[in-house]
C-alpha cells in the first residue's frame, strides 16, 4: 500500500515544486487595488417560551475597495447591505472605512496552493485580517409599522484569500460583527453576531 502511494505523492510534490519556481503575483503590493465582495447567510430555528418554533433569517452582502498603501496593508471603503427577519424585518445599509493586512506572497514564503486548487490553477493562499467601522441606517418593519434607526456597525475578521491566477481571488472570512442603533430618544440598542462569508474579487495592479 505504501509503495503504491509513493509515486503519486512524489508526482504531487514535483508539481508543487515546479509551481514554487514561478514568479509571484503582484497582488497586494504597494500601489495596487483590491475590488471584492463577500456574502453570507444564516438561518436559526429556536423555541419561544410558549414552545412555539421561531425562525431567524440573516443575509449580508459586503462590497469593498482597498488601496494598498504598502506591501500587504490596504485601506479603503466598505459598504454593507443586510436583511434580518425574526417576526419583524430589518433592512440595513452601512458604509465606512476599512483597513486590512494581507500576507503577500514571495517565492520563499507561504507555499503556492497548486495542490489544493487543481480546478482553478495555481494560486497563493493569502491570510488576512481586517477591521471595518461603518455608519449604519436600519429600516424596521413591525407588521406594517415602519421605523428607522441610525448608529454604527463594526466588523473584525480574518480569513484566507486564495489567489486564482494572477489577479482573481475567492476570500473566505470568519469574524465578529457588532452594531448599535438608536431609535429617536430611546436608549441605543445593540446586536452582535459571528459571521462566515465567502466572495469573489480581483487585484488590480500594473
Image: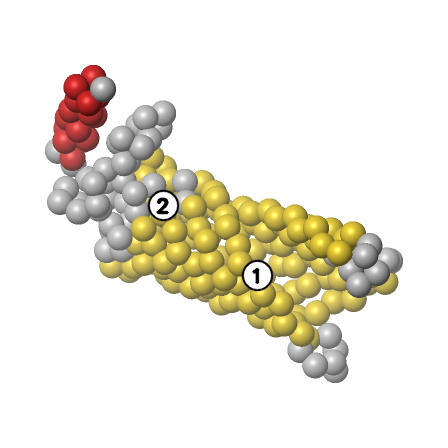
Q: Secondary structure at mark 2?
A: loop
User: Seen in the image, is 19 located left or right of residue 204?
Assistant: left
Name the disc covering residue 161, or none. 2
Position of residue 199 relative to residue 54, above or below, is above
- Snapshot quadrant of residue 68: bottom left
Taking the view exactly as shown, the residue that stands out farthest to the right is 144
Crowding around mark 1 (Cα neighbors within 10 Å: few <14, some 14 to 19, many 20+) is few
Q: Which of labels 1 and 2 is toward the front?
A: 1
Name the disc covering residue 193, or none. 1
Q: Position of residue 29 (x, y in %)?
A: 25, 51
Name the disc covering residue 31, or none. none
| Cβ–Cβ under 8 Å for marks 1 and 2 | no
Q: Residue at x 27, y 40 (%)?
A: 124
**Quarter of the picture holding the C terminus:** top left
Q: Position of residue 26 (x, y in %)?
A: 23, 44
Q: Residue at x 45, y 40 (%)?
A: 200
Q: Residue at x 33, y 31 (%)?
A: 117
Taking the view exactly as shown, the residue that stands out farthest to the top is 4
Position of residue 145 relative to residue 168, above or below, is below
Q: Residue at x 47, y 58 (%)?
A: 175
Position of residue 18 relative to residue 73, above or below, is above
The residue closer to the viewer here, 73 or 204, is 73
Question: Is any atom of residue 56 visible in this view?
Answer: yes
Q: Position of residue 187 (x, y in %)?
A: 70, 81
Q: Position of residue 110 (x, y in %)?
A: 21, 45
Amino acid at each position: 500500500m505504501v509503495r503504491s502511494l509513493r509515486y503519486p505523492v512524489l508526482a504531487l510534490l514535483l508539481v508543487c515544486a515546479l509551481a514554487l519556481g514561478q514568479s509571484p503575483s503582484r497582488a497586494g503590493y504597494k500601489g495596487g487595488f483590491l475590488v471584492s465582495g463577500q456574502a453570507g447567510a444564516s438561518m436559526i430555528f429556536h423555541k419561544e417560551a410558549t414552545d412555539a418554533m421561531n425562525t431567524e433569517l440573516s443575509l449580508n452582502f459586503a462590497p469593498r475597495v482597498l488601496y494598498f498603501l504598502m506591501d500587504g496593508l490596504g485601506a479603503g471603503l466598505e459598504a454593507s447591505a443586510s436583511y434580518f427577519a425574526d417576526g419583524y424585518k430589518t433592512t440595513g445599509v452601512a458604509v465606512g472605512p476599512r483597513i486590512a493586512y494581507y500576507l503577500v506572497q514571495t517565492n520563499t514564503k507561504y507555499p503556492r496552493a497548486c495542490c489544493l486548487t487543481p480546478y482553478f490553477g495555481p494560486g497563493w493562499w493569502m491570510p488576512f485580517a481586517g477591521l471595518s467601522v461603518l455608519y449604519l441606517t436600519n429600516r424596521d418593519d413591525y407588521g406594517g409599522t415602519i421605523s428607522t434607526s441610525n448608529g454604527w456597525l463594526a466588523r473584525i475578521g480574518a480569513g484566507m484569500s486564495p489567489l486564482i491566477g494572477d489577479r482573481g481571488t475567492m476570500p473566505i472570512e470568519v469574524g465578529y460583527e457588532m452594531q448599535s442603533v438608536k431609535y429617536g430618544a430611546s436608549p441605543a440598542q445593540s446586536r452582535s453576531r459571528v459571521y462566515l462569508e465567502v466572495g469573489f474579487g480581483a487585484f488590480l495592479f500594473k
